[in-house]
Amino acid sequence: MSNPYSEKQCVISGVGQSEIGRRLPRSGLQLTVDAVKKALDDAGLKREDIDGVSSWPGQMQNSAPGFSPVSITDLREAMDLKLSWYNAGIESTQMSAIINACMAVASGQARHVICFRTMTEASSMAKGTRSSVQGTGSQRISGPFQWQLPFGAFSASSWAALIASRYMHEFGASREQLAQIALNARRNAQLNERAVYRDPLSMEDYLSARMISDPLCLFDCDVPIDGSTVLIISHKDCAPDLKATPIHIESVAGPLYGRDSWDQQDDLTRFCAEDAGKMLWSRTDFSPKDVDFAELYDGFSFLTLLWLEGLGFCGRGEAAAFVEGGQRIARDGELPLATHGGQLSAGRTHGLGYFHEAVKQLRGEAGSHQLAGDRKLAVVSNGGGNLAGAALLRKD
Amino acid sequence: MGPVPELDELNEFFWTSGADGKLRMQYCDDCQYWQHPPSVCCRKCLGEGIAPRELSGEGTVAAVTINRMPWMPGLKVPYVLVIVELDEQPGLRLTSAMPSVDPEQVAIGDRVKVWFEQREDVWMPFFAPLA
């Protein structure tokens, strides 16, 4: 573990988040600048200190309105950033903004890197364009989507639902067990004034909710928002100069060993979460039992079950039993999950929101939804289907 | 019910295979290995001795979902989507639909057989219960 270029050279020096809402009167770029200013202030850094920007998936406003409306160039021009290094692109794991920033900082290409993820999906939907649904136009379909869209599998909710159905069949998991992911997220969101959905949610509400694609109902799918989240990744040598408690990047991983496909995996219900977990733990001396809380991806509730198994918090096929009743994953349980409400209730910030929350919790700055006790080690995960990344964050 | 695939030199044999009622996928004679989606070489041996070969068209439902969300104007719901594991090889699968049957009657483990529906110059491989 003495690799001088590993992620262990890096800290999260600052975090910032714009207003998060169902439909905001600010553009994607305005929201991004809002979040950058907050992150700079949080870290005690100036705009002139920033010499890198890292993002995923890069601007794709034309192909998927609202999914990623802001380019690095947009941000660079708006804030007149002087960049020694910058990078974004979709042919990379969802957590690649963080992984690449760590590599850039550890190798000396940059010293303070802004990582951002901006969504305006709520506003785009209000205008009648749903970025998460492809192939609704008249054009022909090429590339990987040709194996799903022509059959009517238009949305990731159907792709995930197919895998969820297989999982429930193989392991006897029930909707009541899966519900605990959504119910836990909502209970935490009720304490978080920035969460999008804060009304009480009962098991009865869940079981009687509109089905989207069986076995996933409305409450198993995350909520599109407008908003931007920013992290600043800095070299750990900078830590003494920072305003905030630095959060160390102990380990990070985003491998792709299996098929990049929703139906050709060797094992339909394993997916990439397991590979990300193995690689994550191979890069640290910590183990799952050391983790104080976890911000696991819940773009679909079902993905959280795959992460619990993939990261080794429970055995293969045991995740539904692990979450049954909700006590283990509650804020006073052995492994609190989705402490801000997750993407299911706090909004689809699409990956970086979990980092923002983990940093706030580790520092003890989560305010009304702060966990009890001193929390030193957290896992964050992104994706979980055919792409997956995980990070282990540590406070000294 | 859905858009039409763009035909290219790799996928054309697959999407037009149903013209004679047969499902075909790439097969490597050297490895006795079926692969899908089609590619330029065998993903096992990297050899180019792969060619489209006829399958039985029979398989087992490995995963099922009923989509109930009208994702676009005019989309009739509910309808049933499946992942079918084909008999020829473990893990050789197709995501497809079963538009000719009652969605509520489809279950994992069901034995199914392919049938085709022409959509412009493409033959869509759908599935229906075997026998």
Image (cartoon, coloured by chain):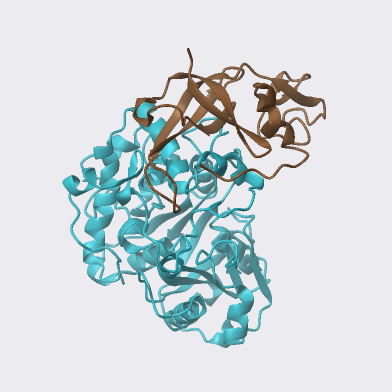
Please name the color used to draw chain B. Answer: brown
Residue situated in front as seen by the camera: A6 or A109: A109
Residue situated in front as seen by the camera: A71 or A375: A71
Q: Residue A240 at what x, y percent from top left?
A: 48, 78
Total tally of numbered discs in the picture: 0
**Extreme residue toward the right, this view:** B48
Above or below, comparing residue A66 to residue A182 in the picture: below
Residue situated in front as seen by the camera: A18 or B116: B116
Q: For residue B58, say whether it is visible.
A: yes
- Residue appearing at x 61%, y 74% in the figure: A72
Q: Residue A275 at what x, y percent from top left?
A: 53, 41
Left or right: residue A208 compared with residue A162: left
**Extreme residue toward the top, this view:** B131
Above or below, comparing residue A334 to residue A50 in the picture: above
Q: Quadrant of residue A100?
A: bottom right
Residue situated in front as seen by the camera: A152 or A15: A152
Please name the color used to draw chain A. Answer: cyan
Above or below, comparing residue B46 to residue A178 in the picture: above
Q: Residue A321 at what x, y percent from top left?
A: 28, 35
- Residue appearing at x 66%, y 79% in the figure: A83
Quarter of the figure that contains the C terminus of chain A = bottom left
Q: Residue A247 at what x, y percent from top left?
A: 44, 67
- Residue appearing at x 65%, y 40% in the figure: B120
Q: Quadrant of residue A186?
A: bottom left
Q: For residue A312, say whether it is visible.
A: no
